[in-house]
Image (tube, grey):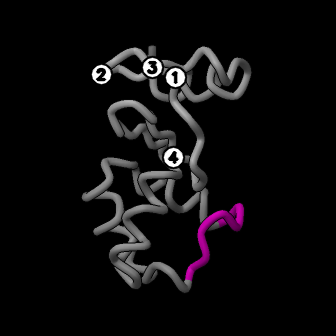
């Protein structure tokens, strides 16, 4: 199951998303981050990975963000166009 399919299933059936480590139900904690209350394993969607990285590295370039999160630059640019990420949190370096 791809991460996107897993995320869609979490939305459709919140109680069905289980931790990969211990099998316990994952809880949504905000900013596209899910956490297991039993073993503290975290699952982050693409947006969650971006948000977590930007919180720790404010003002990083989009290239740095893409390289360190594994998310394609094109996808990050789409998040900026859609207003999910502001251009002030990243430097525009194409």
Circles 1, 3 touching at the beta carbon (< 8 Å): yes
Disc number placed over residue 33 in the picture, else none: 4
Q: Residue at x 45, y 13 (%)?
A: 1
Q: Report the residue marked by disc 1.
A: 25
Q: How many marks?
A: 4
Q: Earlier in the sequence, mark 1 or mark 4?
A: 1
Rendered location of residue 53, percent (x, y):
37, 65
Q: Is residue 35 above or below residue 59?
A: above
Q: Nearer the viewer, mark 1 or mark 4?
A: 1
Residue 24, disc: 3
Q: Rounded to the nearest whole Å, what is the CA distance between mark 2 and mark 1? A: 11 Å
Q: Does the magenta run of residues contain 84?
A: yes
Disc 2 vs disc 4: which is toward the camera?
A: 2
Magenta stretch: helix, strand or loop mostly: loop
Tell me, for residue 21, which label it has, or none: 2
Q: Nearer the viewer, mark 3 or mark 4?
A: 3
């Amino acid at each position: 199951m791809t991460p996107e399919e897993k995320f869609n299933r979490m939305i459709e059936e919140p109680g069905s998303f289980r931790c990969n480590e211990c099998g316990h139900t994952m809880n949504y904690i905000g900013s596209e981050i899910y956490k297991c209350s039993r073993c503290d394993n975290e699952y982050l969607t693409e947006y969650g990975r971006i948000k977590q990285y930007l919180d720790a590295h404010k003002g990083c370039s989009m290239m740095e963000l893409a390289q360190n999160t594994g998310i394609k630059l094109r996808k990050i640019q789409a998040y900026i166009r859609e207003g999910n990420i502001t251009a002030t949190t990243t430097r525009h370096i194409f």
